Image: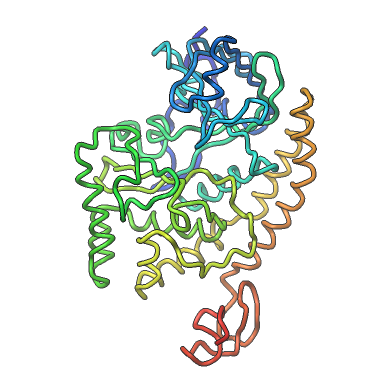
Amino acid sequence: MRSSHASAALPLLLVAASQGGCVPIDPGSDVVFDRTALHEIAITIDEAHLGQLRTNLDERVPCTLVYDGEVVSGAGIRQKGNSAVELSDKPSFSLKFDEFDEETTLHGLKKLLLNGSKQDPTFLREQVGEDLHDRAGAPAARTAHAVVSINGVDRGIYVVTEAIDKRFLRRHFGEENDEGVLYEGPCCGDFAEDIGAVELDSGDDGDATELRALAAAIQDAPDEQLAAEVSERLDLDRFLTSYALETLLGHWDGYAYRANNYYLYENPVDGRFVFIAHGMDRILDDPYFDTETEPVAVLPRRIREIPALDERYRAELARIVTAAWDEGAVLAAIDQAEQVLGEASAGDATRNDLSDFKARVGALRSDLKLRRTLVDPAIVCGDGDIAGLETCDDGNTASGDGCSARCRVEP
């Protein structure tokens, strides 16, 4: 049967987000991302289509999906990622509910991602990243957890992730503001150096005139004019927030440090682009990730080279750590997830995933606490005490005199 918005009369969940909070669009979809429950997803695919699902990353095959008892027919499924893998190796999936029946939704959603989380046995890094983005005022996708089966075979625990699509855009930019151009940046290329590095995801980009103008400003604007020229085409304040979050979370697989895992949305409200992060399953891999690591992408690199912008960036780092990094709330969310995942009782794949989770979740908690102490804004370079990420601190910040100006290099 087809899901309808009226099928779940839920209280409206308001999630704090940039520019005053998310717009309450399709509150019924909150049930899909309810973190207090371990969801059950049963996918049925005709045997004749399994070969295509194993090998074809571009075209979806028909499937029927049952999400917590809600039946969705006419959906399409394909593997998600850069290379196809065997179903037994737990690939990630992209589901499009209206692929074969344009009227079909799941509680108002048209798409959903199922991430196998092979690189994150805790299944929690995307959730931690989402929560911190949310508190800092940057848009990020909702997540939950589910046990997934395909044709009755247990495939283990998956991270259920919101798709970056029109419904996501409505939540963050307003119901009338989902018609802007959306680009996706696959691995690994900086649009500022090569427009061809990004792919049109939705909207009519024509010849990508506005994106080309932004790239030109990033590349060519003189230092003293960079902020003004870029701000005409990009929400620079929000970008500084996104960049600071990548740094604080050690998101080496994001835009700043790998030119990967980002969307660019041309917001119809003011015609400026907004960065949207995703793919945060590798955050906090290294709790010692140095905040002085040189970015790969052009814009963050130029920001670090221009004193006035570097000062704004550092102020945003401090603001996020002080005002948004709610360690208690993050740890409480991990505790809740541990309780929810502990309810899993499916087949061997789920039991193995749960075993890996239990073995790794303690380390994630410890890394979160450690990271917070290492990036504490109270740590001052030049005070003579080596603390946080400092590798030296001789009591001054004079160039060429002992430590570097950021207490990282001892000449």
What's the colour scheme?
A: rainbow
> Which residue is at a point 28% across and 64% down the rendered structure image?
227
Image position, residue 270 (x, y; %):
25, 46
> Which residue is at a point 30% across and 51% down the rendered structure image?
194
Q: Nearer the viewer, residue 368 or 172?
A: 368
Image position, residue 308 (x, y; %):
35, 73
Residue 388 position (above or below residue 42): below
Residue sitting farthest toward the bottom: 401
Residue 30 position (above or below residue 376): above
Left or right of 172 in this view: 44:
right
Q: Quadrant of residue 384?
A: bottom right
> Which residue is at a point 70% across and 51% down the rendered structure image?
364
Please tell me how many numbered marks the rendered image carries: 0
Residue 155 position (above or below residue 134): above
Residue 328 position (above or below residue 63): below
Image position, residue 359 (x, y; %):
79, 45
> Which residue is at a point 26% across and 66% down the rendered structure image?
226
Q: Nearer the viewer, residue 53 or 44?
A: 53
Image quarter where the C terminus lies is bottom right
Image position, residue 142 (x, y; %):
53, 36
Residue sitting farthest toward the top: 1
Left or right of 191 in this view: 21:
right
